[in-house]
Image (cartoon, rainbow, N blue to C red):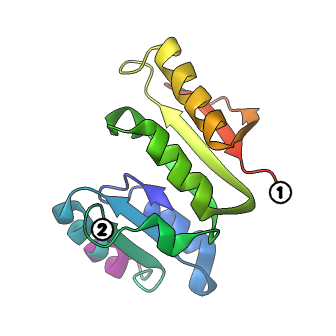
Amino acid sequence: MDFGCAMGYFSIPLAKMVGNTGKVYCVDIQEKMLGKLQKRAEKYGVSDEIKPLLVNKNYNPADLKEQLDFVMLFYVVHEVPDKQALFTDIFSMLKPGGKVLFVEPAGHVSNMGFELSVNMAKKAGFTVYTQTHLNKGMNVILEKKG
């Protein structure tokens, strides 16, 4: 899942990685962005692998209970009003052993704000798998033990 996918900067490469046996669920709040994503997916030959989901329309975490192997949260958690609910929903959608790449921009989120979000993820049931070393941001890989 690419949560907060916008036009699919990461969604398209993820779709190429999963191939025709997998799906990339692309979640966004803007229908216009999902439309652009679908056009890009067609252009790159991965439209069958992309499943766009619009928040407050056809995105329902209960439909994906323990269905996901990986979730990408790239520069999006600070935009979500209920972060605890987001982490709880993602935890429920992941299979045991599933992982989350959680990245926030250093310029928009303080170290303390990032740590508060990581603590919310832990409260939802995640463990920290590893700290990552991506440039220009604070990041961690979370895991649903199992």
Residue 45 lies left or right of residue 55; in this view the side is: right
- Residue depicted at x 46% and y 47%: 86
Tell me which secondary structure the magenta stretch mostly adopts.
Answer: helix
Name the secondary structure under disc 2. helix
Q: Residue furthest right?
A: 146
The image's mark for residue 146 is 1
Relative to 30, residue 17 above or below = below
Q: Amino acid at mark 1?
A: Gly
Residue 55 lies left or right of residue 62; in this view the side is: left
Residue 135 lies left or right of residue 28; in this view the side is: right
Q: Position of residue 122 (x, y in %)?
A: 66, 35
Relative to 109, residue 6 above or below = below
Name the secondary structure under disc 1. loop
Q: Amino acid at mark 2?
A: Leu
The image's mark for residue 37 is 2
Relative to 117, residue 96 above or below = below
Circles 1 and 2 in contact, beta carbons < 8 Å: no
- Please report the bounds of the magenta region as a residue range: 39-44
Relative to 32, residue 19 above or below = below
Would you say residue 10 is visible in this rendering? Answer: no
Q: Position of residue 89 (x, y in %)?
A: 51, 54
- Quadrant of the image occupied by residue 126: top right
Tell me the quarter of the image containing the C terminus: bottom right
Earlier sequence position, callout 1 versus callout 2: 2
Nearest the viewer among 28 and 66 is 66
- Give neighbour class at mark 2: few <14, some 14-19, many 20+ (Cα, 10 Å): many
Task: Tell me how far mark 1 sits from mark 2, CA to CA.
Answer: 33 Å
Q: Position of residue 49 (x, y in %)?
A: 48, 80
